[in-house]
Amino acid sequence: MESDYKIVRELGKGAFGTVYLIKHKREAEWFALKTVDLSRADAKERASAEREANLMRELNHDHVVRYVASTFNGSTLFIFTEYCEGGDLSHFLEDTSGKLPEDLIVCWVYQTAEALKYLHHRKILHRDLKPQNIYLSGEGDIKLGDLGIARILDKGADMASTMAGTPCYMSPEIFQMKGYNHKTDIWSFGCVVYEMAAGERAFDAPIFQFLMFKVVAGVVPPIHSDYSDALRRLVKSMMAKDPDQRPSAADLLERSPVKEFGQSPQRPKEIMKTRGFRTKWGTSESTVDTVKLFKEMVLNPAPPFKDGDIRIPVDSLQVHRERLGLKGAASAVPTSGSGGAGIYGSIMAPKQKAKEKVADKKIEVTLKPERSRTEMSEGRAAIMEAVMRGLMGKMVETQDRTLRESYSSTSSSSDSDFDSTLGASHGTTTKKAIEAQFLMRQIQVLQKHCAEGLGTDTLQDAYSILESVTDAGQLKARLVTLIGEDMFRQYGEKIMYLRLFQVGLDKVRSQME
């Protein structure tokens, strides 16, 4: 039986696989197709991938990406979702210069808070909120997407303990390896709102240790005084160091200025028009060129499947269309610029390559299936690769440079931020001592935890493996041989972070001599 859909173009690649834009051959219906190669996955990892798809299937909210269906094509899992032609928030910010209208920021806070309230009520943490994962419909409405590392908290438990997310948006409790709950999403979202208002990240640094130091020991920067006191207080509360002091998503909706906006909401494009706000977003000058985007292109390399393999179950399509308030054929599906119930958009907009900074790299130190380049099982080998190459690898590459030299490679404003974080009265030696003290605290916590669980002799053997093995797949295999699969799930990533912190501490101490 011939498929009704064809591949238009590749949208991007990620840890799980490749994402394509597909179109109905006769009607104006577009979807994003996320492919997950499970050929190297064991039964447990395959089940985990299916759970991700099933998690998305249950979600039905105007500001959360709508799942359409999932099918298997051999060993490849196909996940079909809505498509959003507005790109993501990072595209919008890149297309925009100057100050964003406060009404627009508050509108997006309102829409995102509604989405988080919906997710958190279902015990789902997003855990990777950042501009690249906040998508926009053609009308500029928010769609939370990329729930690949979201999880449903176990029944009876309200705290997670794995380290996951993108470093510059991670909460202090994650860096401190404490338990965390839905309030970590509020911190990350606070960082995003700050970025909307300030035009720069709240926390950034060229190397990982400095980033951790700024988040855990630093002062949260205020947004510009041009914005209202109410919005400034709201952002500050979202980024409170103590999670208990942060508002919940439901609280955000009841606080000024979000509460007032909710009483008479407007659409983002309406706000831009009313305020006379100018942006390249939505024009031919945008980083998201809609005209070119929907034109078919020759895929090189060609995908490992054909158009005929793309089959969306009829019943799933029917449910999807009913959720959008539609009936019948695909031709009835409105674009995001049309009226109708629901917002027709999707999660997988094309992404530009991120700048090569350690803080840009997404890390997930929780054992979930990701694509591996090694002979090891797909999920956990990829985790080891992310940690070793993404974090420790950067540390090793920069051992011939001092931390200060590395930090000086950033802008003067960032350097000033760092100085103010430590306090202007501190000299260079004092700063190094503070850095060393911070790293030592992290090491002590991890050492105690790992030694209690594994024993000091086994932990020392693990150190030897870390020093002698650089290949991610071999590293995982050696550690599993040493401590076993079950203990690796509990302590594997912690051992690696312990080693990372010790490398950093050695560097700081050498500069103090």
Image (cartoon, grey):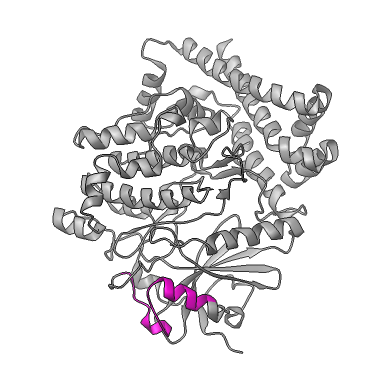
Q: Name the residue nearer the viewer: 63 or 60.
A: 60
Q: Is residue 42 visible?
A: no
Q: Residue at x 21, y 37 (%)?
A: 227
Q: Residue at x 39, y 20 (%)?
A: 419
Is 322 covered by the magenta stretch?
A: yes
Q: Is residue 417 above or below residue 477?
A: above
Q: Image quadrant of residue 202?
A: top left
Q: Is residue 425 above or below residue 405?
A: above
| Label total for image | 0
Residue 314 on image: x %, y %: 54, 81
Q: Residue at x 37, y 32 (%)?
A: 411
Tell me the magenta residue range: 316-336
Is 466 covered by the magenta stretch?
A: no
Q: Quadrant of the N terminus?
A: bottom right
Residue 131 on image: x %, y %: 40, 49
For the view shown, which residue lies furthest in the front direction?
A: 156
Q: Quadrant of the C terminus?
A: top right
Q: Is residue 211 visible?
A: yes
Q: Name the residue nearer the viewer: 130 or 64.
A: 64
Q: Name the residue nearer the viewer: 315 or 188.
A: 315
